[in-house]
């Protein structure tokens, strides 16, 4: 990801939210984690991530925004568009 401090903050927070949602050990979720390489991350896990991210950002995503979300990078890109400006 970009080295910009705000982008690093978003990346760290999204990874933290995914870790919480999937109930995995810290450092289990990394920037390259996805539904394809993380056992706990199934369709129900993706719903749990959605709830965590929406609650944190106090927003609701549209269904068409969520259709292809399968990776940490996808969640970061989605959250970046809704991230409060510093």
Image (cartoon, rainbow, N blue to C red):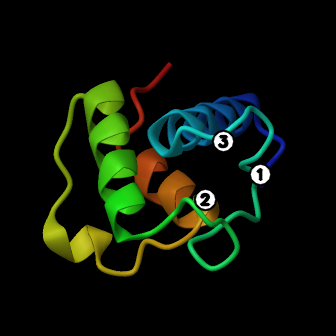
Q: CA distance from mark 1 to mark 3?
A: 10 Å
Q: Going by the image, does 81 lie left or right of 50? A: right
Disc 2 and disc 3 in contact, CB within 8 angstroms: no
- The structure residue drawn at horizontal position 63% and vertical position 40%, both measured from the top left corner, is 24
- Is disc 3 placed on a helix, strand or loop? helix
Nearer to the camera, 73 or 42: 42
Label placed on residue 72: 2
Circle nearer the N terminus (2, 3): 3
Q: Residues within 10 Å of mark 1 (few under 14, many from 20)?
A: some
Given this view, does label 1 or label 3 mark the residue nearer the observer?
1
Image height of 80 relative to 32, above or below: above
Q: CA distance from mark 2 to mark 1?
A: 7 Å
- Is disc 1 placed on a helix, strand or loop? loop
Residue 15 in percent (x, y) is at 63, 41
Image height of 55 relative to 15, above or below: above
Q: Looking at the image, can residue 81 be seen?
A: no
Circle nearer the N terminus (2, 1): 1
Nearer to the camera, 72 or 79: 72
Circle nearer the N terminus (1, 3): 3
Disc 2 and disc 1 in contact, CB within 8 angstroms: yes
* Position of the N terminus by quadrant: bottom right
Q: Residues within 10 Å of mark 3 (few under 14, many from 20)?
A: many
Q: Which residue is mark 1?
A: 30
Image quarter for residue 57? top left
Q: Which residue is mark 3?
A: 11
Q: CA distance from mark 2 to mark 3?
A: 9 Å
- The structure residue drawn at horizontal position 66% and vertical position 29%, both measured from the top left corner, is 9
Q: Going by the image, does 2 lie left or right of 15? A: right
Residue 51 in percent (x, y) is at 27, 42
Q: Looking at the image, can residue 52 be seen?
A: yes
- Is disc 2 placed on a helix, strand or loop? helix
- The structure residue drawn at horizontal position 39% and vertical position 81%, both measured from the top left corner, is 68
């Amino acid at each position: 990801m970009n080295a910009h401090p705000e982008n690093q903050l978003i990346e760290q927070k999204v990874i933290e939210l995914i870790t919480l949602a999937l109930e995995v050990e810290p450092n289990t979720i990394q920037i390259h984690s996805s539904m394809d390489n993380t056992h706990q991350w199934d369709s129900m896990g993706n719903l749990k991530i959605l709830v965590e991210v929406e609650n944190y950002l106090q927003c609701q995503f549209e269904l068409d925004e969520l259709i292809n979300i399968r990776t940490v990078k996808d969640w970061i890109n989605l959250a970046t568009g809704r991230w409060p400006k510093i």
